[in-house]
Image (cartoon, helix red, strand yellow):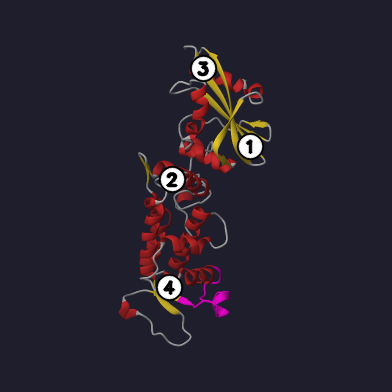
Amino acid sequence: MSDERIFNIFVYFDRGTATQYGVRHHRIAGSDQEKTAYLLSRIEQDHPIARRFHFTRSFTPEEWLAVFRQGQSLGYFEEAFDLFRASAAPIFCITSVVDGRPIVERQIGPEPYQGDTMTAREGLGAVPDYLQHYTSGATFRFTDLIHDDYFKAIRALFNAQLHVSCSKLLVSCIDTLAFVEFGDVSGNFTKWVVTYVDLTPVGISADELWEFRNSILHMTNLASRKVVAGKVSPIMPYVGGPEALPAMAHGVPRPFNLHGLIKALAEGIGKWGETYNSDRDKFLKFIERYDTTVSDSRLTWIPHSQADRTSSVA
């Protein structure tokens, strides 16, 4: 109930990018709830006159949401908190101001914006939040996440001898990882493979794998346009040891061991995950992009009955 300094913080987005934030402080007494309510009541008056500071980097709205998802937003306001002598755990309200207009869509506190807070829908439940499920202390378990989202199904298909379907999901997994790493840009698939996967034991190149991906995903054949044009050599998966290697007849696509490719990709994913441990901005980009993906464990629908959960295709 004591009198303390509290803060209205504003993040200014102009034409889709924020480079500045503003702070307006007040000193009032009351409960924490009363102080927060006061800050909310002052948003319209405070945002035009708040003292402005520069971020150390720029943010898009999606990147700024990723900051909240990670739970490290206060670290970006240290200059203002030092200037205004804020307490170690200040009461604050953060509001986005988009092209001069404050947007109060949700109230996000000092805790990470994760779990039910983010995904819950009244009367429907909540989709599991991967950030909570795969975080242990300060460590995020990348390989466990990708294993559960992709490799469980890849291994299940391989063990069921559904090798074409396994190949499709395998290259689709690379598509997702390349998007998360580099964004939706041309060449991201081969760039990710070259950067993280050692294909030497498999005996194929990243370009050949890309053309295999194009043909197997789009047409379920082995003849992409570049293969047909003779620009890239065709490849095809086989299963078994060296003794099972198909004969290299003229005009037949060069075989590669599918299990060997799965193993090489798994090792590459481990190498890829290590790059996020020491780079906060890179992990923010991971959150921003991975939030847009779906998986078997993060369905986009919520079943309404046990019958929905057990339905099948005859």
Residue type beneath disc 2: Asp
Does label 1 or label 3 sit earlier along the sequence? 3
Q: In the figure, residue 227 lies in which quadrant?
A: bottom right
Residue type beneath disc 3: Arg
Residue at x 47%, y 22% (from the top left corner): 90
How far apart marks 1 and 3 lie (CA) works out to 26 Å
Q: Position of residue 33 (x, y in %)?
A: 51, 19
Does label 2 or label 1 sit earlier along the sequence? 1
Residue at mark 3: 5
Q: Is residue 233 magenta?
A: yes
How far apart marks 4 and 3 lie (CA) works out to 63 Å
Circle 3 packing at 10 Å, graded few (<14), some (14-19), many (20+), is: some
Residue type beneath disc 4: Ile
How far apart marks 4 and 2 lie (CA) works out to 31 Å
Does label 4 or label 2 sit earlier along the sequence? 4
Circle 1 packing at 10 Å, graded few (<14), some (14-19), many (20+), is: many
Q: Is the residue 51 above or below the residue 264 in the image?
A: above
Residue 160 shows up from this direction: no
Q: In the figure, residue 134 lies in which quadrant?
A: top left
How far apart marks 3 and 2 lie (CA) works out to 33 Å
Q: Is the C-beta separation of discs 4 and 3 under 8 Å?
A: no
Does label 1 or label 4 sit earlier along the sequence? 1
Q: Nearer the viewer, residue 222 or 183?
A: 183
**Magenta portion: prevailing SS class:** loop
Residue at mark 1: 13
The residue range painted magenta reads 218-235
Residue at mark 2: 279
Residue at mark 4: 204
Q: Position of residue 241 (x, y in %)?
A: 31, 75
